[in-house]
Image: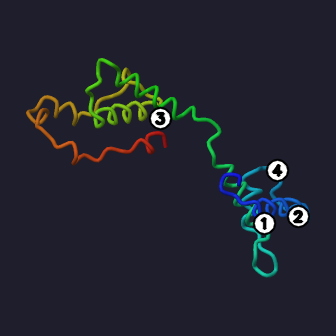
């Protein structure tokens, strides 16, 4: 077995690969449009004779080429939550990482960020230090940080 693919499926995929040249394909210069066309292909009976190979190749195409982005996120986490800040809550860590990701996404930084006037008004009022329940806050998840 190769990553959940049986020997029968491998033989089927090999046969489908050999038969790919028998059809005239329109999108042959780019990978994703080609395999999308193969995946959506149907013969006269309405069947897709290339379904297994197209599904297999598309599943390979969505695999990450490297884990550099994940390593970058963990590097940012270790910079923010270092040995001096080891008691920082996950809510605070998530908030800081979200702010940093938003700055990076908007090509902005803390030096040229303009604080909204509503926030400045709130800072000078008594509402600044009212306690809140952190569980009630809706923080974005780590998966949505870099969209």
Q: How crowded is mark 1: few (under 14 residues within 10 Å), some or many (20 or more)?
A: many
Q: Where is residue 89 in the image (x, y as percent from the top left)?
A: 27, 33
Q: Position of residue 61 (x, y in %)?
A: 68, 49
- In the drawing, does residue 77 fall left or right of residue 44? left
Could you say which quadrant of the image residue 45 lies in?
bottom right
Q: Distance between the residues labelled 3 and 1?
A: 40 Å
Could you say which quadrant of the image residue 49 lies in?
bottom right
Q: How far apart are marks 4 and 2 (CA)?
A: 19 Å
Mark 4 touches mark 1? (CB < 8 Å): no
Above or below residue 90? Residue 9 is below
Q: Residue at x 43, y 28 (%)?
A: 108
Element at badge 2? helix
Nearest to N terminus: mark 4 or mark 3: 4
Mark 2 touches mark 3? (CB < 8 Å): no
Could you say which is closer to the camera, residue 21 or residue 2?
A: 2
Q: How far apart are marks 1 and 2 (CA)?
A: 8 Å
Mark 1 touches mark 2? (CB < 8 Å): yes
Q: Residues within 10 Å of mark 3 (few under 14, many from 20)?
A: few
Could you say which is closer to the camera, residue 51 or residue 116?
A: 51
Q: How crowded is mark 4: few (under 14 residues within 10 Å), some or many (20 or more)?
A: few
Q: Residues within 10 Å of mark 2 (few under 14, many from 20)?
A: few
Could you say which is closer to the camera, residue 111 or residue 41?
A: 41
Q: Which of marks 3 and 1 is in front?
A: 1
Could you say which is closer to the camera, residue 117 or residue 32?
A: 32
Q: How far apart are marks 4 and 3 (CA)?
A: 32 Å
Mark 3 touches mark 1? (CB < 8 Å): no
**Residue 50 shows which numbered tag?**
1
Element at badge 1? loop
**Residue 105 shows which numbered tag?**
3
Q: Residue at x 85, y 63 (%)?
A: 15
The residue tagged 4 is: 29
């Amino acid at each position: 077995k190769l990553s959940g693919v049986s020997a029968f499926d491998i033989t089927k995929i090999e046969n489908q690969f050999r038969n790919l040249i028998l059809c005239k394909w329109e999108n042959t210069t780019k990978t994703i449009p080609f395999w999308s066309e193969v995946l959506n292909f149907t013969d006269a009976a309405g069947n897709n004779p290339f379904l297994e190979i197209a599904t297999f190749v598309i599943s390979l195409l969505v695999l990450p080429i490297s884990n550099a982005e994940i390593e970058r996120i963990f590097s940012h986490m270790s910079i923010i939550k270092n040995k001096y800040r080891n008691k920082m809550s996950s809510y605070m860590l998530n908030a800081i990482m979200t702010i940093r990701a938003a700055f990076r996404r908007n090509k902005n930084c803390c030096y040229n960020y303009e604080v909204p006037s509503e926030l400045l008004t709130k800072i000078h009022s008594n509402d600044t230090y009212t306690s809140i329940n952190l569980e009630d806050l809706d923080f974005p998840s780590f998966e949505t940080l870099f969209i």
